[in-house]
Amino acid sequence: MTCLPARTEKKLGLVIDLDTCVGCQACVTACKEWNTGGHMAPLTDIDPYGGHVDGVWFNRVHSYEHTTEMGGRTVNFPRSCLHCEQPACVTVCPTGASYKRASDGIVLVDEDKCIGCKLCSWACPYGAREFDTDVGVMKKCTLCVDRIYNDNLAAEDRVPACVAACPTSARHFGDLGDPASAISQLVTDRGGVDLMPELGYKPTNKYLPPRARSERAAKVDAPALQPIRAEGGFLGWIDRMLSN
Amino acid sequence: MHPAFSVVFFTTATGAGYGLLALLGVLGGLGFVHADFWLGLIGMVLALGLIAAGLLSSTGHLGRPERAWRAFSQWRSSWLSREGVASVATFIPAGLFGIGWVLLGRSGGWVAVAGLLAAAGAVVTVCTTGMIYASLKPIAQWHSRYTLPAYLIFAAMTGSVLANALLQGFRLGSTAVLTWALLATLAGWGWKLATWRYNDGLEIPTTTNTATGLAGGTVRSIEWPHTEENYLLKEMGFRIARKHGAKLRRITQALAFAVPAILLASVFFLPWPLRAIASVLAAGAQFAGMLVERWLFFAEAKHTVTLYYGRE
């Protein structure tokens, strides 16, 4: 059913710290490794050793240069499904393959019902959904439903693969619907933000902006180069002669 | 957005088919155009053929076309599902109207009811097609007040120009239909120009800043997550060179609007075999022009995901 639940019991999601993400791509490979054998398996690769590599990934890390009057900095930016409260990707689905779970708010695709019309990927402003040309159906992040409720795993491993893999703890998992949860506190303390809030999708996942630059930070800017005055004397005469 | 030919042909063909069906349903059902077996047969085969060919073409871009029947289930939330339901439902009154008007040679009574219901179904189906695009917030050029009227105007335009060609071909030309076709073509031209002007001046509030949550200053993409084009860039990162866009807009204006308008205006003054030829040429040129228009509708639409890839 592609109508959205009026409310969800939990709002499970991720909080991503843009201050500490180092862009190592560990979350990307951990995601691919787990999910190519998980709920949405396989995450097909097309021509993986050829000249036109393509394939399905749920998590992609971009790098940006953010320049303000305070100077410039590199920001590594992991991009994956935000499990929105108003996911248009679900409501546009003509077959009922896409759905948002009333229990925990996770947005999933039933691969057996998907006709591969791709409209959901057009409706997602964040580019979270990727089409599997080999299987002919749409695929997306499952928030590792097959890990977070998995009794066969040790309790500390019942988090999404990307969160478990992050070496700098830049990725956090929890219930963003519970204001008392550690992850909600983190969002409050650090001023977590929504992506493209103006579109009204109400993403569950939040991003923590990089911390303000410390005034103690060393000034690394090199002094500007001085304009070169024309050389006088004999060497200057030779330079002018050779330049002609 | 990537202009997939299956979808470009689908929306152009069904638009013309539903426009023609609506006009035949009203004019034939109410007896303004008297039943003539060959006129009716060719008209209905053309209208339903364009619709069927368009719908079949649209399944061409599905990953799993054998499951297409599932698309009739989610009409409560999905415009695509509503389009599927409306398009199939319209075949019922259209088929009854065809039997009554073409095979039995009748107008009025139940044939009129079937004809009017077919026309209503055609209008509803074109509306659902327009809303599929108009409801997509990530694509500002589509999520505008111009999109839905455009689909309706273009369906009325291509349908009436086809109807005029049909009637003129059977020496049954009507000044009212001819005038309507000419006015619809001019209205379509005006609407397309207004849409382009609106899109060219569009100030989109979504920027790389809001897409990344990095407030203030400038955000420049310095490295992609992948070295080759992925699904997102192939499907939604389509770009068209500005000079090609300008040239294609001129081709659209010439083929879809200017040439048909001149040909239709000349029909008022031409004797029979020539007026039929001019009317058919107008319909052919317009259909080709509308294929270019629909291709541009996709090619010039920019999806917000391109912001993540530094494509302003």
Image (tube, rainbow, N blue to C red):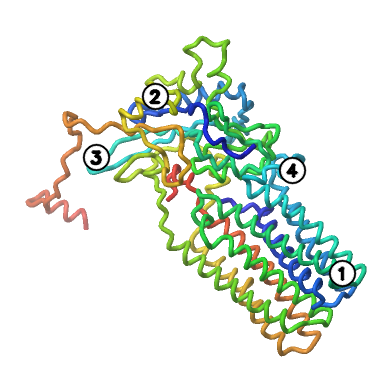
Instruction: For marks 3 and 1, give the CA distance.
Output: 75 Å
* Same chain assignment for discs 2 and 4: no
* Same chain assignment for discs 2 and 3: yes
Q: Residues within 10 Å of mark 4 (few under 14, many from 20)?
A: some
Q: Residues within 10 Å of mark 3 (few under 14, many from 20)?
A: few
Amino acid type of disc 3? Gly
Q: What element carries label 4?
A: helix
* Same chain assignment for discs 1 and 4: yes
Q: Which of B180 and A130 lies nearest the eye of the viewer?
A: B180
Q: In this view, does A48 lie to the left or right of A114?
A: left
Give the residue pinned by disc 1: B101
Q: Which of B74 and B164 lies nearest the eye of the viewer?
A: B74
Report the residue at 43% width, 59% height from top.
B202
Give the residue pinned by disc 2: A183
In the image, residue A137 sits, relative to residue B218, either above or below, namely: above
Q: Residue A236, position in %: x, y?
A: 12, 51
Give the residue pinned by disc 4: B68
For the residues carrying marks 2 and 4, which lies nearer the camera in this image? 2
Q: Is mark 1 on a helix, strand or loop?
A: helix
For residue A71, the mark is 3
Q: Is residue B167 left or right of residue A220?
A: right
Q: How crowded is mark 2: few (under 14 residues within 10 Å), some or many (20 or more)?
A: many
Q: In this view, does A216 lie to the left or right of B137?
A: left
Which of disc 3 and disc 2 is earlier in sequence? 3
Q: What subunit carries mark 4? A: B
Looking at the image, do the residues carrying marks 2 and 4 touch, with CB atoms under 8 Å apart? no
Q: Which of B62 and B25 lies nearest the eye of the viewer?
A: B25
